[in-house]
Amino acid sequence: MTSENQELKKAGLKVTLPRVKILQILENAGDRHFSADDVYRTLLDQGEDVGLATVYRVLTQFETAGLVMRHHFEAGTAVFELAKGEHHDHMICLDSGRVIEFVDPVIEKRQHEIAEEHGFEIEDHSLIIYVRPKKK
């Protein structure tokens, strides 16, 4: 049994060809974050006959099952990445659209301190920093 099949079964999802193909695309994405349209175009490039509505439905099922995380980085476009289990934050280059993932223990500690100072405990959070290259 392939690792994709095992992941789907572990998440309580039936193993179907569209689910396996979409999961493979996301597993091979590295640090890239795919929109539903990106996934759809990749499937078409691979010669797969999967509709855009199916891609959206599968990505939503994956999100509900905890396999992927949905982010809204750019003007309303949702992008997806595999849920890897470890927290990380994002920087988005406004010129290129490049997404840089990072982890910074100092930032994490300070966020918890700020929540505590205001009488709160952090349940979850997302930090997105929009950047441009420095001018030389």
Image (spheres, helix red, strand yellow):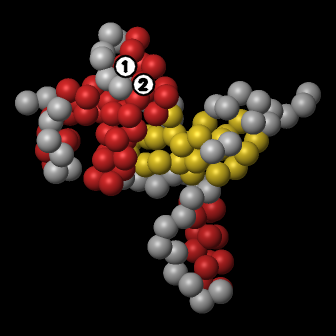
Identify the element where label 1 is drawn: helix
**In this picture, is 109 found above or below 7?**
below
Provide the residue designation for mark 2: 40
Residue 108: % across, % down: 57, 64
Q: Quadrant of residue 74?
A: top right
Check the image and name the residue furthest to the right.
136
Q: Nearer the viewer, residue 60 or 33?
A: 60
Query: Measuring 20% from the left and 50% from the top, which residue is drawn there?
Result: 11
Residue type pointed to by label 1: Leu
Q: CB under 8 Å between callouts 1 and 2?
A: yes
Q: CA distance from mark 1 to mark 2?
A: 5 Å
Q: Nearer the viewer, residue 25 or 102?
A: 25
Query: Measuring 45% from the left and 19% from the top, which residue is drawn there?
Result: 41
Provide the residue designation for mark 1: 43
Q: Is residue 136 left or right of residue 116?
A: right
Residue type pointed to by label 2: Tyr
